[in-house]
Amino acid sequence: MTKLVLLVDVGEDRASFSFVEPGAGLGVVHRTLCADQDELIWSLDRAIMAQQAHLSAAAFAAPGPVVAGAIQLTHVALRLDQGQLREALGLDDVRLVNDFSARAMAMPLLEDDSLEQFGGRRLAGQAPAAALGPSGGLGVSILNPDGFVGWVASAGEGGHACLPATSQRQADVIEALRRSSPHVSADRVLSDRGLVEVASVITALDGGRGQASTIAALVEAAERGEPSACEAFQLFSEWLGVVAGDLALTAGARSGVYVFSPMILSWGERFDRARCRASFEAKGPMTPYVADIPLFLVTEPNCGLLGLSTLFGSGR
């Protein structure tokens, strides 16, 4: 009987998972809530029994660095422990991967219909690519060609680097954010919570009162044309371009920068692609260098699982 591999992509309070044959594409993708590791294991055990799956290995992706055989998720209490997962699942081969390393590993497998390109041009030959994704935080990873026929993803925590200001208005917003917490990182601002916080700051800077308390309310406010909400989305678009351009320069990501963000996809035209692209290219003497680099908005919903599948020779 064929033994399957279990792939699990964990978010802040929920996970997606799939059982795959090594060397084959993704199977049915399941979703589950996971407030903690015990709840996740319980859900996976039930799915394994229902599937009557005979597992040979498992891989888990989650937002946070892999340290001493565990991932402590950055923004919630959930912690994945490799040893405990091995024991609970009865497997010797259990792997932990940063969620954006998993997404970076998926990039060579993405089809054109899963990518919206804005700006730049596709370059011939192999060169590094970069991944970043605003959601509950800002994930970042770099994909490097291995010099042969494959790719190697480099895990990092680049999303927590300081957020730069490229205009006086951006500087004013950052200074206001510093009053509540001195470290203003890209991760803090380029996130759902961060966007709401930025909108609140803009309202206060302009002498207004009242603010949207959720991202959904902020989208509705922007659609009504409320100035602070509209400006918050504009600044978000600009800052994403700035950070993506800095990442392209740092990584030499001539193959492109890939933005993985269901949150942004849900905004429609609220995400200003033109502002993002202009900020991406505004790099002084290096503008011609980044002008050639494509930006992609990824529409494939299961990139984490797709990337994990490459650990076992799987693909589309």
Image (cartoon, helix red, strand yellow):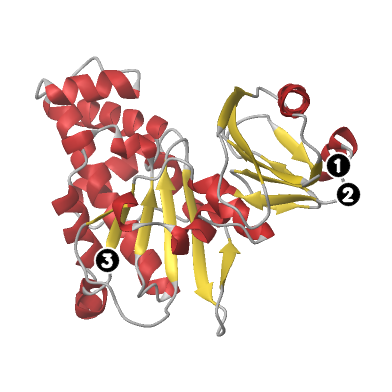
Q: Amino acid at mark 2?
A: Asp
Q: Residue furthest left?
A: 225
Can you tell which mark lies on residue 92? 2
Q: Amino acid at mark 1?
A: Arg
User: What secondary structure is found at the residue carrying circle 2?
Assistant: loop
Using the image as rendered, state which of residue 172 and residue 78 is in the foreground. 78
Q: Residue furthest top?
A: 210
Using the image as rendered, state which of residue 64 and residue 197 is in the foreground. 64
> Would you say 85 lies left or right of 40 here?
right
Classify 93 as above or below 81: below
The answer to whether mark 3 and mark 1 are in CB contact below 8 A is no
Residue identified by numbered label 3:
294
Q: Earlier in the sequence, mark 3 or mark 1?
A: 1
Q: Earlier in the sequence, mark 2 or mark 3?
A: 2
Q: Amino acid at mark 3?
A: Pro
Residue identified by numbered label 1:
86
Estimate the spatial distance between the alpha carbons at disc 2 and disc 3, rounded to whole Å.
41 Å
How packed mark 1 is, by other alpha carbons closer than 10 Å (few <14, some 14-19, many 20 or more), is some
Residue 34: image quadrant is top right
Q: Position of residue 199 (x, y in %)?
A: 26, 30
Image quarter where the N terminus lies is top right
Can you tell which mark lies on residue 313? none
Number of the front mark, 2 or 3 = 2
How packed mark 3 is, by other alpha carbons closer than 10 Å (few <14, some 14-19, many 20 or more), is many
